[in-house]
Image (cartoon, coloured by chain):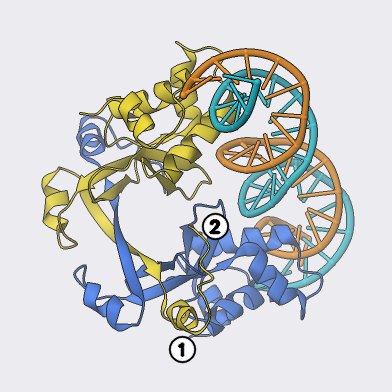
Chain colours: A yellow, B blue, C orange, D cyan
DNA sequence: CTGCTTGCAAACGGTTTGCATTATT
DNA sequence: AATAATGCAAACCGTTTGCAAGCAG
């Protein structure tokens, strides 16, 4: 298990107490997803001066460096969690929590059911470059904004 | 192809010009996803008095009645589209548009590729009731908030 | 007629931004 | 010493809400 320090240093980011605390918290709960404010509320106990803006900037930076993944929820809140080995998500419509679901392939529905969750719906989201963008990319020089 | 009128009436909603216009626009572009403001901008040409709040209320109502689906994006915008037969989504990281992808099952990755899109990542989202909620549901009377 | 819907405008809330100060390298 | 990160507070912006006036049933 890697430490927050190593992870941060490995991406040539400056190591600050705030960054270490944020990432350490997430490392302590692998597979869990937090809102920025939930993270801050938790850390406020041991780091009472942690600013809201700092939490957001830190999370954005960690996403940009590929350490965290960002999940958009329908109620307008972004959730953050470790970017673990390829996996999928489970959203509980009752408690509205998000779970990570391990998967080596796309056809692992049984795996989810065996975890005790009871899936009623599945939503597959592919990300990549669409047909028309591929075409225009070969025409002109790529106009690809970084995601 | 059903009409906007029929669809609205079928859910015992009152038929208003605004509702008809919003839904008709979506019906004219099946498989496309719009932001609330994009819809309003489009309709403003023929319906210059359409209020922002009305657009939002209408879309929420249509989602609640199961006519539309709601998609949350990472940049804090909600997208709306027709709730067609079970399908999945494709997000183009280049033009940031969302596409619907037909699918009769979960294992239809090839289908996406054959559409000309080039998927680099897949994200499976399950929705339902999680293990712990199922347990507590059998303990006490269900405390399930409607999604 | 009754009460749901609209339009308008103000409120909301999560996230971003600017800038002086502080900490890391 | 140079540069990047923090804290604070204000700005942002998509969405929601409240309410008087208007329209559908």
Query: Percent position (x, y) of residue A122?
Result: 28, 60
Quarter residue A99 falls in: top left
Q: Position of residue C23 (x, y in %)?
A: 54, 15
Q: CA distance from mark 2 to mark 1?
A: 26 Å
Left or right of residue C6: residue A137: left
Q: Is residue A32 left or right of residue B32?
A: left
Look at mark 1 in the image and give the residue it sits on: B1
Q: Residue at x 35, y 46 (%)?
A: A93
Q: Residue at x 69, y 75 (%)?
A: B42
* Disc 1 secondary structure class: loop
Give the residue furthest to the bottom: B1
Indicate the secondary structure of the residue bearing disc 2.
Answer: strand
Of residues A62 and A80, the one nearer the viewer is A62
Tell me: residue B46, above or below residue A3: below
* Quadrant housing residue D6: top right
Chain letter behind tag 1: B
Marking on residue B48: none
User: What chain does badge 2 belong to?
Assistant: B
> Is residue A85 rendered to the left or right of residue A22?
left
- What residue is at 33 percent from the left and 32 percent from the top? A7
Q: Is residue B105 left or right of residue B50?
A: left
Q: Which residue is mark 2?
A: B78
In this picture, is B146 found above or below C21?
below
Q: Vertical placement of A1 versus A147: above or below?
A: above
Closer to us: A78 or D22:
A78
Residue A16, can we see it? Answer: yes
Picture coordinates of residue A134, whole percent (x, y): 43, 79
């Amino acid at each position: 298990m890697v430490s927050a320090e190593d992870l941060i240093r490995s991406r040539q980011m400056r190591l600050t107490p705030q960054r270490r605390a944020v990432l350490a918290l997430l490392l302590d709960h692998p597979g869990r997803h937090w809102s920025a404010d939930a993270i801050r509320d938790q850390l406020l106990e041991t780091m009472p001066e942690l600013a809201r803006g700092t939490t957001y900037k830190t999370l954005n930076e960690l996403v940009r460096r590929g350490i965290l993944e960002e999940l958009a929820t329908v109620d307008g809140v972004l959730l953050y969690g470790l970017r673990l080995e390829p996996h999928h998500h489970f959203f509980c419509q009752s408690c509205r929590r998000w779970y990570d679901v391990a998967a080596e392939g796309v056809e692992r529905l049984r795996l989810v059911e065996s975890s005790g969750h009871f899936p009623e719906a599945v939503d597959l989201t592919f990300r990549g470059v669409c047909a028309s963008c591929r075409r225009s990319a070969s025409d002109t020089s790529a106009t690809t904004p970084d995601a």
